[in-house]
Structures are given as structure tokens and as C-alpha cells.
Amino acid sequence: MASVSEMYDVTWEEMRDKLRKWREDNHRNSEQIVDVGEELINEHASKLGDDIWIIYEQVMIAALDCSRDDLAWTCLQELKKQFPGSQRVKRLAGMRLEALEKYEDASKQYDSILQDDPTNTAARKRKISILKAQGKSAEAIRELNEYLEHYGKAAFCLEELMMTNPHNHLYCEQYAEVKYTQGGLENLELSRKYFAQALKLNNGNMRALFGLYMSASHIAASPKVNATVKKANVKYAAWATNQINRAYQLAGRGTKENKCSVKAVEEMLESMQITMS
Amino acid sequence: MSWRRWLAMGEVELSCLAYVKMYLHACLFPRCSVNGLLLSSSPAGGAVCVTDCVPLLHTHLPLAPITQLALTQVDVWCAQTQQRIVGYYQANACVSDSSPTPCALKIADKIAEQCNNAVLLMIDGGKMSPDYRVPPIVMYERKDTRWTLKDKHTIMLRQWEETRDIASQLLDSGDHSLLVDFDSHLDDITRDWTNQKLNAKIAELASPANGNV
């Protein structure tokens, strides 16, 4: 079978850089990672220097996804040899046990991590995933509540995340969605503000744009708001409509592919305008 | 309504196109719960013929805004293309539990408001394998105000083996990555959530003599 480097005419450096990019973007294209990573490990290990350890980790996780236990085992062994007693490697061993559905053993592995380091959230989260995978929802919830005790509920978690990551438009947008879902006028107004904030941080975030449009429209249509608030929200919604239309017009240029979605959006915005006035 | 159509009430037909896209959606995001809408191009009354589906989300299924947005947009598209929303499908991330989540029930309820014999379809992840002998799906229908399990014998998938093989072929060739759900569309609005390209591929593979699609 032809190697990756032969098939795509790439050098080992390009393969290594690709793996790094996938790590940074948190891509979980496991089959590709296995193909590229396995070749790098087998043919070019000596050239990779210290990068090899993080590559072993990345390839191991991808191998688990593709049911390549042989490869996962090899990577794990190399990491165990290099980093004996490491919590991080212990967690990987736990993940492998989970992939093999050896849940009790996996749980014990995570327990041993938590004994040494009770604040290790990664291990705690894996324990909860195991309970979920086993269908033990009541126990999963109990464990989750323990874990969340320090953080409160979903909205509060996101508030924490936003405080420590003020430039992350995704947390902002997600918080807005949670507020929108909770419903009620106050939450809708909050959601609109956070959608707007997410847009300030990234004006290409379509979810935030649509979210702003929808929250503003709902507020404007609510019988509980006074004329001033209504007027302001009609303006926000109109602005969002404009931006959405522009984005879709731009996207529609040159491709036949998304003509359907462009038309659908246009009609939707038109019809919602009518109900708001 | 004709006598034959009246007899067919309570039956649900699932087309090759709808099944293959749902199945591929679940395969494309194996670590996530996914959901989507079931559509019909047949007139109301008689059997429910699910002729197509629109894959919706693979993230944050229970959050409202994007779901509402998607429902509205699909509604508009359906009106433009003479289709109706007749159901909802979901595949849970956790394969050991294929029961409908509160979010699934909520959305199905909303659809049932407009379509009185709407169906709720859960994909049973535990039964998804290339050579499984029966379709890995469980269907629910609304009786009074509750969603109850449908009798397996009222669910029809014509040419199941061909359908199953088409799905496998698309997975093997990597063409399943052509599938665009609403979530992916929002990440890049040049991508088409009506999946015209993938539909064409599926039509190509479907046996022309049987008129599956």
C-alpha cells in the first residue's frame, strides 16, 4: 500500500506541520491523523525530536477513534516509558480502557489520578462520561453536581469562562443562547446584549448575527415593552437583517450551491418583518 | 381520500434518500448527538411518505435559538419546494440509550402542531453496523398527548438492502463528508444545507429500475 508521502507527494516536515495545525485547531479527523501520524512515527521518529511525544499522544487518541488498538497500545507504551508516573499518561491509559469498554478498569484508573490530585477536572469529567456511556444517568448527574458545586449552573460556568477569556466570542455566543433558551423578557434582553458582544468580538459569527436578529425581534414583538424599547429593538433587528442579507448575497456570488439557502433566508426575513410591525 | 389511502393511514414509508442522509449524518459526527427534520413531498392524508430529510445540528441540541432559526428556514424552503415537515430524527451520542430526550419530544411536539401524523424517529446507535439486517431505527407516533412506540410492521423501507449498501458505499468512498447540516452551514454559509450535491450522488447510486428515490 502506498504511503501518505508517496500518494500526496509531501515531505515528512509537511506531515509534521499538518499534525501540529490539526492539534492547534482541535481537529478530530482521526482517520487522517492515524494515516499521517503512523507513517511519521514509523519512518521518521528520529527526526521529530521532542515533538514526538505530543505526536504519540495525538495519534493515540485518533487510533482509539479508529479502533486501531494496536497503534494506540504502541503509542501508550512509548509515553509510559518516557513519562513514568505521569497523570497525563494515566489519563490516556484510562481513555484506552474506555475505548475497549473496560469501564470498571477505566474508572479505577481515574480514581487513582484523583487520589493524587483531587482537583484534576479531566479525570473527573472522564468518570462522568463513563457513567453516561453505561447509561447510569442518575449517578452521572450526582457526580456532575459534585463537579459543578464549585461552578454553579451552565450559565454561571459560562460567566466564569467569559471572565477569564474575554476575547472568546464563542463563549459569549453560547451564553447568549443559554439565556435565550431560558426565556422571559429579562433573559431575552441579556441574550441580545451578549449576541451583540459576540459580534463585536467576531463580526463573522453568523450564529451571533441570527441570534441578535431573533432576540431583538422577539423583544420588539413583546406586549410587555414600552415604545422606546420597542423602537430600539426594531432598529437592532433591522440592522441585523441588513447584515444577514449582505452576508448571504456575498456568499451566493459565484456559486449555484447555496441558492436555496439564500432564498430561504430572504423570505424568512421578509415575513418576520411583517409580523413585527 | 381513496379507500387505499385510507387503509394506509398509520403507515410510514421512509425513502432511500431520507434514510441514507440521516445515517450519514450520524456517522459524520460519531461523538455528538445529531438531529434533523423529516420532509415529505407527498400530499397529506394516507400514509406518511418521508421523501427527504434536512440534517440540522450536531452541537447544543437543547439550545433554542438555532433550532428555531432552522425550523423557520426549512419551513420557508418547504413552502418554496412543495414539501412539508412531517417529522424529526435524532441520534444520541450515547449509543446505549436511544430513547427520545426532552429536547426531541419538544421539537416533535412543535412539528405535530402543524402535522397531525408526525413521526419521531430515533436512530439506534447500538445497532448501526454495515451488515445489520434491519434498519437501526425506532419510530414514535403521537397518541393522545404522548409519543408511543410505533408497530414495526407499519414502517416501510423499500429496497432495504440496496439502501443499506448505498450508505456503506458513500461511507467507504468518503463522500459522506459532502453532507452539510445546518450547524455546518452557519460555520460557512456558502455550504448548502439542502444537500443538492449529495442528493445527486445518492440518486446516481440508487438502482434506476426500482425508482427508489
Image: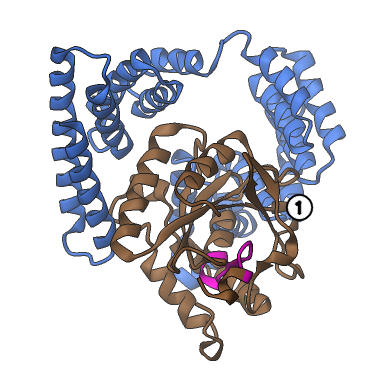
Chain colours: A blue, B brown
Q: Secondary structure at mark 1?
A: helix
Left or right: B98 in relation to B60: right
Furthest toward the bottom, the residue is B209
Instruction: Name which residue lies at 49% across and 75% down.
Output: B202
Can you tell which quarter of the image residue B168 is in? bottom right
Left or right: A7 in relation to A230: right
- Locate the N terminus of chain A and report the quarter of the image it occupies: bottom right
Instruction: Name which residue lies at 76% across and 21% down.
Output: A113
Left or right: B55 in relation to B72: right
Q: Does B195 lie within the magenta span?
A: no
Res. B160 in view: yes
Instruction: Name which residue lies at 72% across and 12% down.
Output: A118
Res. B172 in view: no
Q: Nearer the viewer, residue A225 or A7?
A: A225
- Locate the C terminus of chain A and report the quarter of the image it occupies: top left
Callout 1 crowding tier (Cα within 10 Å): few <14, some 14–19, many ≥20 = some
Residue A15, horizontal then vertical, whole percent? 48, 55
Can you tell which quarter of the image residue B147 is in? top right
**Residue at which label 1 appears:** A69
Q: Nearer the viewer, residue A126 or B116?
A: B116
Is residue A193 placed above or below B195 in the rendered structure? above
Is residue B2 placed above or below A244 in the rendered structure? below
Query: Exactly how many numbered labels are in the figure?
Result: 1
Left or right: A122 in relation to A207: right
Furthest toward the top, the residue is A150
Is residue A71 placed above or below A150 in the rendered structure? below
Question: Chain letter of disc 1?
Answer: A
Residue A165, horizontal then vertical, whole percent? 39, 19
Residue A252, horizontal then vertical, whole percent? 20, 58
> Given the image, on which type of amino acid does mark 1 rest?
Asp
Residue B126, horizontal then vertical, whole percent? 74, 53
Q: Which residues are magenta?
A: B7-19
